Image: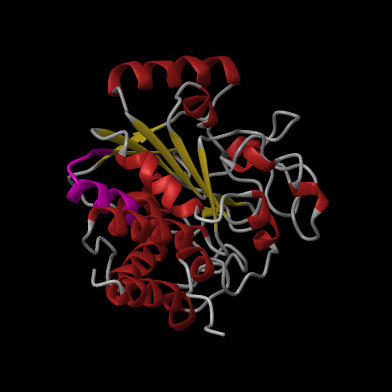
């Protein structure tokens, strides 16, 4: 019997150390393509949110900004207008990765009422057709933001969730259960070992899970590439440079909290495996 063909989902869920793959049966088999199709069905303007604060280091992590920019660059090539959304704690790292020509909206770190009002103004003024979040900590049921250790990081996290509460077309990418979008599965996440008992409750229209959120972002770009018929992925060298630039701007490895070009404890040569295999996947399909 022929071996089943590898999918994008297989590639982005490899080396799963957090048990995020346990959630796969609760999503459509082709969840990446479904997310990519939602984006292409809502052309014009995308707002892309990212930035996750690492409490032990007092700094943002390397997972998030590279993936956000990979999506932004891909959508730019498809004719979308792009703007990023983050807060003061992650803006420097994101700016070190994003092209200078692309705008970054700084969402204030403030209370829920003020955050809701700011989100309403952003939606009104920007008129986005699609919202995307990758590796952005999301609200838990008690109204706080918590990292994978369950520690409260609310004071370092703008309430960007309010944007997603206001928009019908959205995609969330996460690798741990506490990111914007994981609210789609908040009832089942606590049932699985290693995943948070108090997961994010903020929902999105389409959810993408991956072993590393950057990998989920690259998987989404691969899905967009399939639908568009052209390879929109960054090169491995470009991705390595993004991580290096983020570290120079103060970002750290999310696992160790150390200032080194690792992503979720994966050194560059291991972190690059996912992107290499996505390129090979598209090449095998003539893209």
Q: Is residue 69 above or below residue 200?
A: below
Q: Residue at x 32, y 28 (%)?
A: 128
Q: Is residue 113 above or below residue 151?
A: above
Q: Position of residue 155 (x, y in %)?
A: 62, 36
| Magenta stretch prevailing secondary structure | helix
Q: Is residue 126 above or below residue 155?
A: above
Total residue callouts: 0
Magenta segment: 69-82
Q: Is residue 180 left or right of residue 230?
A: right
Q: Position of residue 119 (x, y in %)?
A: 44, 21
| The N terminus sits in image quarter | bottom right
Q: Is residue 50 visible?
A: yes
Q: Position of residue 224 (x, y in %)?
A: 32, 53
Magenta segment: does it hold 85?
no
Q: Residue at x 51, y 63 (%)?
A: 9
Q: Residue at x 29, y 24 (%)?
A: 126
Q: Residue at x 21, y 61 (%)?
A: 230
- Rendering colour mode: secondary structure
Residue situated in front as seen by the camera: 239 or 182: 182
- Outermost residue on the front side: it is 1
Q: Position of residue 231 (x, y in %)?
A: 24, 64
Q: Is residue 97 left or right of residue 29?
A: left
Q: Is residue 100 left or right of residue 68?
A: left
Magenta segment: does it hold 76?
yes
Residue situated in front as seen by the camera: 4 or 239: 4
Q: Is residue 97 visible?
A: no
Residue situated in front as seen by the camera: 84 or 20: 20
Q: Is residue 37 left or right of residue 164?
A: left
| The C terminus sits in image quarter | bottom left
Residue situated in front as seen by the camera: 204 or 95: 204
Residue 159 falls in image quadrant: top right
């Amino acid at each position: 019997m022929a071996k089943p063909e590898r999918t994008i989902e297989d590639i982005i869920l490899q080396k799963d150390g957090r048990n995020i793959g346990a959630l796969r049966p609760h999503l459509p088999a082709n969840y990446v393509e479904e997310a990519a199709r939602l984006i292409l069905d809502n052309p014009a303007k995308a707002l892309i949110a990212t930035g996750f604060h690492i409490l032990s280091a007092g700094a943002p992590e390397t997972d998030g900004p590279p993936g956000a920019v990979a999506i932004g660059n891909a959508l730019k090539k498809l004719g979308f207008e792009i703007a990023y959304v983050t807060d003061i704690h992650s803006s420097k790292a994101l700016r070190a990765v994003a092209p200078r020509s692309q705008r970054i909206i700084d969402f204030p770190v403030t209370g829920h009422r003020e955050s809701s009002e700011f989100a309403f103004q952003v939606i009104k003024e920007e008129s986005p057709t699609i919202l995307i979040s990758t590796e952005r900590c999301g609200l838990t049921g008690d109204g706080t933001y918590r990292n994978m250790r369950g520690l409260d990081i609310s004071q370092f996290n703008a309430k960007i969730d309010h944007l997603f509460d206001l928009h019908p077309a959205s995609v969330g990418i996460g690798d741990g259960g506490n990111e914007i979008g994981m609210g789609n599965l908040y009832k089942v996440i606590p049932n699985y070992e290693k995943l948070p008992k108090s997961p994010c409750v903020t929902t999105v229209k389409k959810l993408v899970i991956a072993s590393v959120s950057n990998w989920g972002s690259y998987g989404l770009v691969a899905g967009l590439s399939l639908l568009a018929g052209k390879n929109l992925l960054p090169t491995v060298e470009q991705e390595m440079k993004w991580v290096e630039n983020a570290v120079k701007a103060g970002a750290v490895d999310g696992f160790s909290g150390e200032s080194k070009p690792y992503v979720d404890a994966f050194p560059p040569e291991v972190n690059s495996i996912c992107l290499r295999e996505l390129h090979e996947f598209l090449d095998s399909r003539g893209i």
